[in-house]
Amino acid sequence: MEDNQQNSLFELEFNDEGKANLSSIAQWGYVNAVVGFISAGLTLVSAFASGARNSETGGNILTVFVSISISLLLNITLVNAAVNLKKGVNDSDQGYFNLGMLKLASYFKILGILLIIVLVIVFLAMLILLLASPGATSGIK
Amino acid sequence: MEQFQQDQLSDLKLQVDSEVRQHLNSSAKWSKFISITVFIFCGLVLLIAVGGSTAIIAAMEKMSGRNLGFITSNYLWVIIGTMVFALAVFVFIYYFLFNFAAKIRSALMSEDVDVLNRGLGSLKSYFIITTVFSILMLLINIYNLFK
């Protein structure tokens, strides 16, 4: 009993305001993910529509599939986070809540890793452009 | 007895236990990285746009062989103005994510529930703004597809 009291004294607890915020985060995260799914579907439709018109779209189709896969991965993680957070907050279920928090952390981790990949690609592209420019080679000579 | 159990269930509270603490810390760490990277990117684009504008005008004048002066510079300033507005919107959105990261870390260190709530409020604002922009982009894409 005393242990229990000590735990609640030294552990942070979400009050009503915190629960309302978490509920809103789950709700808007869910809407965000659904919009992301619709956007991915629309991208696929427009890619097939343009592919039917001109035949030289092999590279484009690959780009579209990569971007749709990334979008699906991100949005599925966000939906999982939103659904579990909502369940956890509504039923005061710590298990669902922890799972929701884990998925939310994974969502931000995936976003961060994607950003690092984009940064590396941009850096390499700039390096190649600098090395390929005629000024750079004459400077070395 | 049943009534007592129900009361106990309704009294159950969500706690920031060690697992949630770990997940919140991870979210805050990555959010901070993402927001700071976006701030740096926006700063660099702004520097290049403003610093390089005179060089762009000079290059255009050299290519056309005459003084383009007023028209070109006006056109360029419109482009730079639009770019600055877009960058300001980006910074505004990611400021909320940065705020979330900073406040959550501070709340976990100081065990302050008010700061924790403010951090969650910032994340809520971030999701609201990004969702609204996503819906706008979706509508623009739908319009372009059926145009």
Image (cartoon, coloured by chain):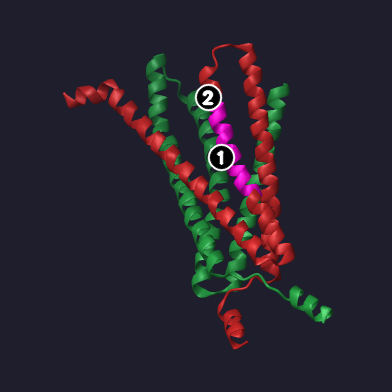
Chain colours: A red, B green
The image shows residue B57, relative to residue B34, as above or below, that is above
Q: Whole-percent x and y of residue B30?
A: 48, 53
Dot 1 lies on which element? Answer: helix
Residue positioned 57% across, 11% down in the render: A55
Q: Chain of mark 1?
A: B
Dot 2 lies on which element? Answer: helix
Q: Nearer the viewer, residue A4 or A89?
A: A4
Q: Which residues are magenta?
A: A63-79
Label 2: few (<14), some (14–19) or many (≥20) C-alpha neighbours in 10 Å: few
Check disc 1 and give the amino acid type: Ala
How far is mark 1 from mark 2, CA to CA? 29 Å
The quadrant in which the C terminus of chain A is found is top left
The answer to which image quadrant residue A123 occupies is top left
Find the residue positioned furthest to the front: B1
The residue at which mark 2 appears reads as A62
Q: Would residue B49 be found to the left or right of residue A84 on screen?
A: left
- Is A78 a magenta residue? yes
The image shows residue B82, relative to residue B21, as above or below, that is above
